[in-house]
Amino acid sequence: VEFVESGGGSVQVGGSLGLYCAASWDIIRFSGIGWSRRAPGKGPEVVATIVTGHRTGITEYGDSVKGRFTISRDNARQAVYLHMNSLQPEDTAVYYCNLYCRGPDDYDFWGQGTEVTVSS
């Protein structure tokens, strides 16, 4: 699977950014798609996920971004979006698109990452 990621950049505290990821495969064939991040000196963190095979697109968010970030998908475009509001310095990280299967066998496919920097 190949990905096209875009939308990272630099923003001041309280600002907003949007991330975009398009996959080369039909995402409806997978369990879900989402975003994870890795901040400098920290371990990976799941930011948000959305079910791709279900009509209503069930979403889940990491505790640190609930109420500030919104994930959405476009199955027809094999794409996922992450709208980030009220950004804080602790949101500074490299954000990775993740397409995954969960079942008898787990599969994960990762984008190349896009950097987000929040400055005060």
Image (spheres, rainbow, N blue to C red):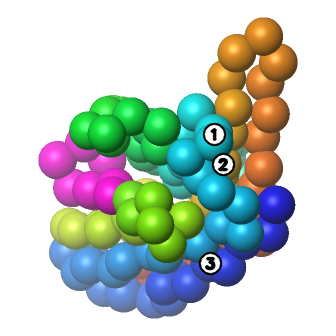
- Location of residue 2 by image quarter: bottom right
Residue at which label 2 appears: 99
Query: Mark 1 falls on what kind of element?
Result: loop
Q: Nearer the viewer, residue 100 or 92?
A: 100
Q: Nearer the viewer, residue 111 or 118?
A: 111
Nearest to the eye among marks 2 and 3: give it. 2
Which sits earlier in the primary sequence, circle 2 or circle 3? 3
Q: Which amino acid type corresponds to the residue marked 2 in the rendered image?
A: Leu
- Location of residue 102 by image quarter: top right
Q: Residue at x 54, y 53 (%)?
A: 35
Image quadrant containing the C terminus:
bottom left
Q: Nearer the viewer, residue 83 or 94?
A: 83
Q: Distance of mark 2 from mark 3, alpha carbons?
A: 13 Å
Q: Is residue 70 magenta?
A: yes
In this view, 36 is above or below 111 = above
In this view, 33 is above or below 96 = above
Q: Which amino acid type corresponds to the residue marked 3 in the rendered image?
A: Glu
Residue at which label 3 appears: 5
Residue at which label 1 appears: 30
Q: Distance of mark 2 from mark 1, alpha carbons?
A: 7 Å
Q: Which mark is residue 40?
A: none
Nearest to the eye among marks 2 and 1: give it. 1
Q: Residue furthest top?
A: 104
Which sits earlier in the primary sequence, circle 2 or circle 1? 1
Disc 1 residue crowd, few under 14, some 14–19, many 20+, Cα 10 Å: some
Q: Residue at x 26, y 38 (%)?
A: 56
Residue 75 x %, y %: 45, 59
Residue 105 x %, y %: 82, 18
Query: Mark 3 falls on what kind of element?
Result: strand
Q: Are marks 2 and 1 in contact (CB under 8 Å)?
A: yes
In this view, 12 is above or below 46 = below
* First to last magenta residue range: 65-72
